[in-house]
Amino acid sequence: MESLLIKGGVPLHGEVTVSGAKNAVLPIMAATLLTCEPCMIHRVPDLSDVKFMGQILTSLGARVAFDGSTLRIQARKINGVGDYDLIRRMRGSVCIMGPLLGRLKKAAVSLPGGCVIGARPIILHLKGFKALGAKVTIEGGFARASARRLIGSDMFLGGRAGSTVLGTANVMMAATLAEGVTVIESAACEPEVVDLANFLNAMGARITGAGSPTITITGVTQLHGAEHEVIPDRIEAATYAIAAAATNGEITLRGARGDHLHAVFDKLKDTGVNIERKGTTVTVCRKGRLKPVDITTLPYSGFPTDAQAQMMALMILTPGISIITERIFESRFMHVSELARLGADIEIEGPSAIVKGGKPLSGAPVMASDLRASAALVIAGLAARGTTQVNRVYHLDRGYEQIDSKLRKLGARIKRIQGP
Ligand code: EPZ
């Protein structure tokens, strides 16, 4: 298995281009199942999750062709039952269920099961399908939904932690081909949901209100092919911005959507980091000593849970006490014990981590446990004295396009090696 070897202590400098958003392209790829016509998707990031979704669509009968960062998909003839093992291995693939139900009036996917960051049930997805008139069962490890007709209806999709991103996406996709009007209340407002709605509308859907907690979908009888450019990845952009602050460097993010990052930039400014936005270019530069801040993760437009671990890596470098509270996932502190190997002082109290920051870090071998935790370990390794070895980097490759070569271009001493 591959690992990353990082010699820390070098301030990052230079420009980095932000890739297309993983969490936008996955549901957009699934949405191509709603039509038998060809679709073209641009700015597709080169990630293992994207390749995986391609395999899943192929297992359903679609034709999938990658051409650099452009993807051509045609789901002329498809079946409603996805490959059990393939789907089980990637949670994000649950979002094929809505399009299959919308188009074929039946769908069966293997239950995604929990992951290291939490139980992650799909109850709300199924609740939405039921509200559209589908019969839903969970049997033999499969979640199944079927209906003779789908009828638009009003529904509330809020749950324990507020809205659900993929739940909103799934139900919105099924409702595009339902009869009548569907209104989703407590819908997720994430930019990735808006990007999906824009793609669906380009396919001939009639969706309004995406980006707000109330989304209205007026059903149509069929959808056609479309072409779309995916939004830039706000979490990748946030990760590089935090790495610039952690290494006392200056980075220019090219092709970023600063308007998707208000909560992150607001906190970075509070720590004393300078953020300069010009169009789709954002320059991040640390000016002197960092100040501790408290963070609570919330649904969009609050502070993203997907940037929590990276922000913790910055706070361990910051003199003083900061409190980081995770409100979205019940066990998203897997990075804490690994950061402690580098010398961090963090205590967990219920949903909060109390970070006593400012102690210099020293490099050590650490283990990645999930995508964002591994990004935090890379940031801490870049700031630590000596050498850090991050093992199991396959977690990183799921969500960061060419992270080691991008960091090397910014001056980092980082290389990929065969690990344990
Ligand atoms: C999406 O996951 C993202 N994944 C996650 O990014 C991200 O962390 C999450 O949204 C929150 O922003 C993709 O888009 C592929 P949720 P999703 O449903 O949709 C609970 C990353 O690092 N819930 O919004 O699966 C759930 O358990 C990944 O890129 C229910 O209780 O997340 C969680 O606590 C990790 N019942 C909360 O809601 C349900 O039916 C939010 O989950 C559904 C969700």
Image: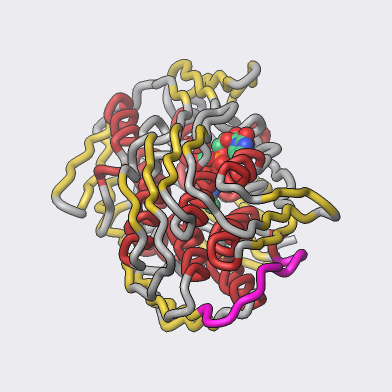
Using the rendered image of the protein, determine whether residue 372 is visible from the camera's viewpoint.
no
The residue nearer to you, when weighing 408 against 73, is: 73
Residue 81 placement (x, y as % from top left): 70, 68
The residue nearer to you, when weighing 351 against 126, is: 126
| Quarter of the N terminus within the rendering | bottom right
| Quarter of the C terminus within the rendering | bottom right
* Residue at x 44% of width, y 34% of height: 185
Q: Is residue 167 left or right of residue 314?
A: right
Q: Main secondary structure of the magenta part?
A: loop
> Would you place residue 62 above or below residue 354 in this image?
below
Which residue occupies the extreme right position in the image? 140
Residue 162 placement (x, y as % from top left): 51, 29
Quadrant of residue 226 within the rendered picture: bottom left
Span of residues in magenta: 75-86
> Would you place residue 336 above or below residue 22 in this image?
above
Magenta span contains residue 10: no
Q: How is the image coloured?
A: secondary structure
Residue 140 placement (x, y as % from top left): 85, 55
Quadrant of residue 272 within the rendered picture: top left
Q: Is residue 213 left or right of residue 262?
A: right
The residue nearer to you, when weighing 276 against 289, is: 276
Ligand 1 found in image quarter? top right
> Would you place residue 297 above or below residue 233 in this image?
above
Using the rendered image of the protein, determine whether residue 110 is visible from the camera's viewpoint.
yes
Quadrant of residue 343 within the rendered picture: top right
Residue 75 placement (x, y as % from top left): 53, 78
* Residue at x 72% of width, y 44% of height: 114
* Residue at x 36% of width, y 67% of height: 203
* Residue at x 22% of width, y 35% of height: 274
